[in-house]
Image: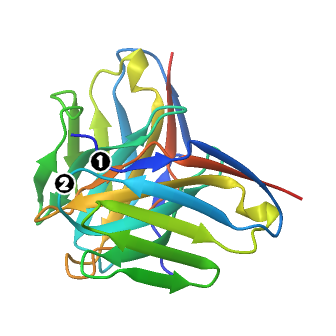
Amino acid sequence: EPEVTQTPSHQVTQMGQEVILRCVPISNHLYFYWYRQILGQKVEFLVSFYNNEISEKSEIFDDQFSVERPDGSNFTLKIRSTKLEDSAMYFCASMVDVTYNEQFFGPGTRLTVL
Amino acid sequence: SQQGEEDPQALSIQEGENATMNCSYKTSINNLQWYRQNSGRGLVHLILIRSNEREKHSGRLRVTLDTSKKSSSLLITASRAADTASYFCATDLYNNNDMRFGAGTRLTVKP
């Protein structure tokens, strides 16, 4: 069964460093999402992406964040200058189309900012 | 704005019992989905119910949706120890398919 994959599973970085989290959505999906979950808290929406542009973003997704679909398979989340409070699990999700509307989640990347 | 508030926050039951978790939300939705998350792991989609549906079943799962009360419930029948996890409801707003998650219910099923 096709699934969303994410790499790395765990990323440790120093405060102020740039990180890129990678996701490979399910191949025929058209809508892509990033969510994050701070330890012990709820899953929070960050950004949605369709047709090579951002559809919507939350207030969390500030100028430090960017997303890109550099080729036909990868979907990346970049954090330019990480802060301690960026430590969280980051989940990528993809969806085939809005008609069906089920989002499939990847296993997540645990980001630890020291 | 916050969507999808689950209750109870934590639920502990014996194996074989049924577990009921509730979710309330604030604005009109397209769909409501329930997800499961084992500790420190990813989200697993359980079931989606559309705003024009009232009840849906999948195996031991039964989901109801009451759009007039803006609430949903997830029933897990004949629970097993392996059902121990956090369960989240997530809603997507009408005309917007970005999902908003609740804080989750932590279910513990004791063998």
| Residue B66, horizontal then vertical, whole percent | 33, 69
Same chain under badges 1 and 2? The reply is yes
Q: Is residue A4 above or below residue B52?
A: above
Q: Quadrant of the C terminus of chain B?
A: bottom right
Q: Is residue B84 left or right of residue B40?
A: right
Q: Earlier in the sequence, mark 1 or mark 2?
A: 1
Q: Is residue A86 above or below residue B22?
A: above
**What residue sits 50% from the left and 47% below the top?**
B7
Which residue occupies the extreme right position in the image?
B111
Asked whether B47 or A25 is in front, the reply is B47
Residue B3 image label:
1
Q: Quadrant of the N terminus of chain B?
A: top left
What subunit carries mark 2? B
User: Residue A50 sits in which quadrant?
Assistant: bottom left
Asked whether A68 or B35 is in front, the reply is B35
| Residue designated by label 2 | B27
Q: Is residue B58 above or below residue A101?
A: below
Q: Is residue B37 left or right of residue A57?
A: right
> What SS does tag 2 mark?
loop
| Residue A4, horizontal then vertical, whole percent | 45, 66
Asked whether A91 or B100 is in front, the reply is B100
Asked if the residues shown at circle 1 and circle 2 are in contact, with their CB atoms under 8 angstroms apart, the answer is yes
Residue B52 showing in the rendered view: yes
